[in-house]
Image (cartoon, rainbow, N blue to C red):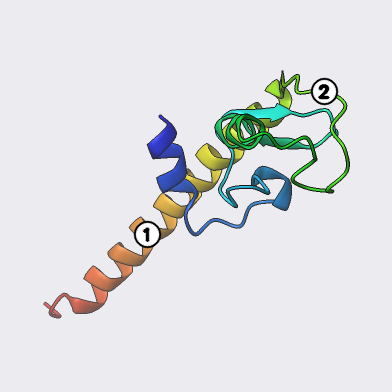
Amino acid sequence: WDDGMRRISFGLDLPDEFYCSITMEVMIDPVIAADGFSYEREAIQDWLSKGHTTSPKTGGNLPSTELIPNHSLKSLIQDRLLSSSAQKLQEIRRQTETNENQAAPAP
């Protein structure tokens, strides 16, 4: 699912809030850090495991290393990606049909 979500997000116009400020990729498992911002879980865990005690976004001190799952953002991202990818697929099908019709010899 993770790789698929990254693949189908390519080329879509998505809100900045859907992207992790550490990885610059669409988040799959967003969590809220003590700075109030959401990050991809793996990226912020890696940041913290390297001994950082500051926010990757603001540079301010992080009073805690607790991470809270951001279920709302995760649902928004998944819904938007699935909806957008379905729309892209319809556009590709229409273009393919138009190209096939233009290429077909006249009867």
Q: Amino acid at mark 2?
A: Ser
Q: Mark 2 — residue?
A: 64
Residue count near mark 2 (Cα–Cα under 10 Å), binned few <14, some 14–19, many ≥20? few
Q: Tag 1, which secondary structure?
A: helix
Foreground disc of the pair 1, 2: 2
Q: Is residue 54 above or below residue 16?
A: above
Label 2 sits on a secondary structure element that is loop
Mark 1 or mark 2: name the one nearer the start of the chain. Answer: 2
Q: Which residue is mark 1?
A: 92
| Residue density around tag 1, few if under 14, some if 14–19, many if 20 or more, within 10 Å | few
Q: Total of numbered circles in the picture?
A: 2
Gap between marks 1 and 2, in whole Å?
47 Å
In this rendering, position of residue 43 left or right of residue 85: right
Residue 43 image position (x, y, % from top left): 58, 37
Q: Is residue 75 left or right of residue 84?
A: right
Q: Residue at x 22, y 69 (%)?
A: 100
Please name the residue shown 32% across and 69% down the image: 98
Furthest-front residue in this view: 51
